[in-house]
Amino acid sequence: MSDATQAPLRAYRLLPGLGDFRTLHINNLLKLMRWQTGGSPEGGRPTGFSAEWAATDDGDPRVRPAEFPSGYPGAPVLSRRVADLLRDELCRAGSFEPLDIADGPDSILDAGEYVLYLVQSVVDCLDTRRSSKPKRSGGEVKKAVFRPEAFPADLPAWRLPEFPTAVYWNGWAVDRLKELLGDDLEARLIWSEDPALAPHPDPWGVF
């Protein structure tokens, strides 16, 4: 275990920050979800993802795009800048897939410079006796408690067999991302070994 993976163990869900940023809509979610729920075979990774920029509330074309612009739980998107800086760490758990983004406002430069982070690692680490029961529709686990001895401390991110369409993020990886992204990123704590850290009451809610 590296210095970056020191205790306490923590797991998060990540979303775009709540500031005035432009976000992305992913167009190929059904294809992604079928792969995630079907066992995620190495040879069958989905490709050809596309997205489009969401309109801002006030329609201002000058609002800049976030560097973590996707809030969908199973489809993290990173700017090429961040992906390149964290490539060695993040590729332990998955791969970066090209993302074809439809033309946005003229103020958005290099709109194609984003990648979808396809998390392949599925880890059986949920304490099912202490966690809430997965929802029948989609498998969402509102309250997740992890078994420390099975927690994937060396992986930046992973998915659960019970909830394969969502990505969980390790605390040390979130710390690295926050250093690079600042207010572009919202991190909702799902679980921690430290009882003094309170989990978010609704980590999988939209906002």
Image (spheres, rainbow, N blue to C red):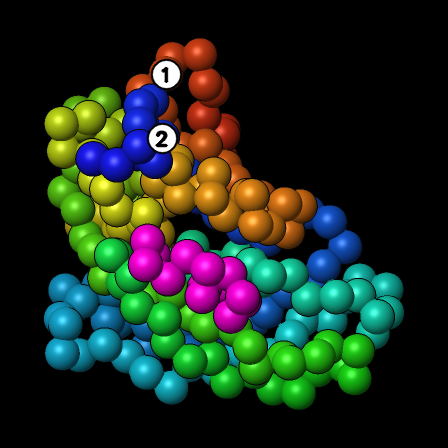
Residue 130: percent from the left, percent from the top? Answer: 23, 23
- Per the model, the C-alpha gap separating discs 1 and 2 is 8 Å
Left or right: 95 as drawn, with respect to 85: left
Marker count (numbered):
2
Residue 207: percent from the left, percent from the top? Answer: 60, 46
Tell me the magenta residue range. 78-90
Q: Is residue 25 above or below residue 105?
A: above
Q: Is residue 72 above or below residue 154?
A: below
Q: Identify the residue at horizontal 75%, vertical 66% (top origin).
A: 64
* Mark 1 and mark 2 residues within 8 Å of each other at the beta carbon: yes
Res. 4 image quadrant: top left
Q: Secondary structure at mark 1?
A: loop
Q: Identify the residue at horizontal 32%, vertical 77% (top origin).
A: 31
Q: Main secondary structure of the magenta part?
A: helix
Q: Which residue is mark 2?
A: 10
Q: Identify the residue at horizontal 41%, vertical 57% (top origin).
A: 86
- Label 2 Cα crowd, 10 Å radius (few <14 / some 14-19 / many 20+): many
What's the residue type where badge 1 is placed? Asp
Task: Please state which of residues 72 and 173 is positioned toward the viewer in this rendering.
Answer: 173
Residue 87: percent from the left, percent from the top? Answer: 37, 62
Task: Please state which of residues 54 and 76 is positioned toward the viewer in this rendering.
Answer: 76
Residue 99: percent from the left, percent from the top? Answer: 47, 80
What's the residue type where badge 2 is placed? Arg
Q: Secondary structure at mark 2?
A: strand
Left or right: 196 as drawn, with respect to 43: right
Would residue 59 be seen by someone viewing this image from the given angle?
Answer: no
Q: Which residue is mark 1?
A: 194
Residue 173 is inside the magenta segment: no
Left or right: 28 as drawn, with respect to 52: left
